[in-house]
Image (cartoon, grey):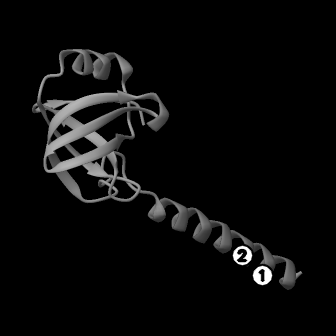
Amino acid sequence: MNYKRLFGIILSLSFLAMVACSAVSQKPAGTTKPEGPQITVKGKIDYMKNLGGYIVTGENPPSTLFIVNQDPKVLEELFKSQKRITIDGHFTIGADHLFIEKIDGQPYLGKK
């Protein structure tokens, strides 16, 4: 009978340890940091179907960046206007995939 009691105690402690470890390993909501380096680009939005849709043609710094979180409604309007804009974001995959956070200082809620 002592072995059953000891087994029950060990099993209970193991379960508590698993629950405590899983709670500690989770990040609190809203504390995620950007995946890559931050960047500010001044340029225009362009569209190239063979490159996956909308891209940023940067003038300062000169670059061509793929937009990871494309929102076609917002980007189509900017593409048609050919307006020079300031984009704040961060790189995701390598140095040519851009996750946009702000356009001209306004939050950009594109799709992930």
Give the residue furthest to the bottom.
Answer: 2
Q: Quadrant of residue 30?
A: top left
Of the residues shown, which amino acid type is indicated by label 2? Ile
The part of the image, by quadrant, that contains residue 105 is top left
Q: Amino acid at mark 1?
A: Leu
Camera-side residue of 109 and 59: 59
Q: Is residue 97 above or below residue 26?
A: above
Q: What residue is at 41 percent from the left and 55 percent from the top?
A: 93
Q: Determine the residue positioned at 28% across, 19% down.
A: 74
| SS type, badge 1 | helix
Residue of label 2: 9
Residue 112 image label:
none
**Could one spot residue 108 in this view of the protein?**
no
- Residue 6 drawn above or below residue 43: below
* Label 1 neighbour load within 10 Å: few <14, some 14-19, many 20+: few
- Residue 56 can be seen, yes or no: yes
Q: CA distance from mark 1 to mark 2?
A: 5 Å
Q: Please provide percent x and percent y for residue 68.
A: 39, 40
Give coordinates of residue 20: x percent, y percent: 52, 65
Res 47 → quadrant: top left
Element marked by disc 2: helix
- Tell me: 12 left or right of 2: left
Q: Is residue 15 above or below residue 110?
A: below
Q: Which quadrant of the rendered structure holds the N terminus? A: bottom right
**Residue beneath label 1, please?**
6
- In the rendered image, residue 34, in percent from the top left (x then y), is placed at 30, 53
Query: Going 58% across and 62% down the picture, which residue do you hit?
Result: 19
Q: Nearer the viewer, residue 9 or 69?
A: 69
**Residue furthest out toward the right:** 1
Q: Would you say the residues marked 1 and 2 are in contact, meaning their CB atoms lie under 8 Å apart?
A: yes
Image vertical order of residue 109 relative to residue 19, above or below: above
Residue 18 rendering spot, x and y as whole percentages: 61, 67
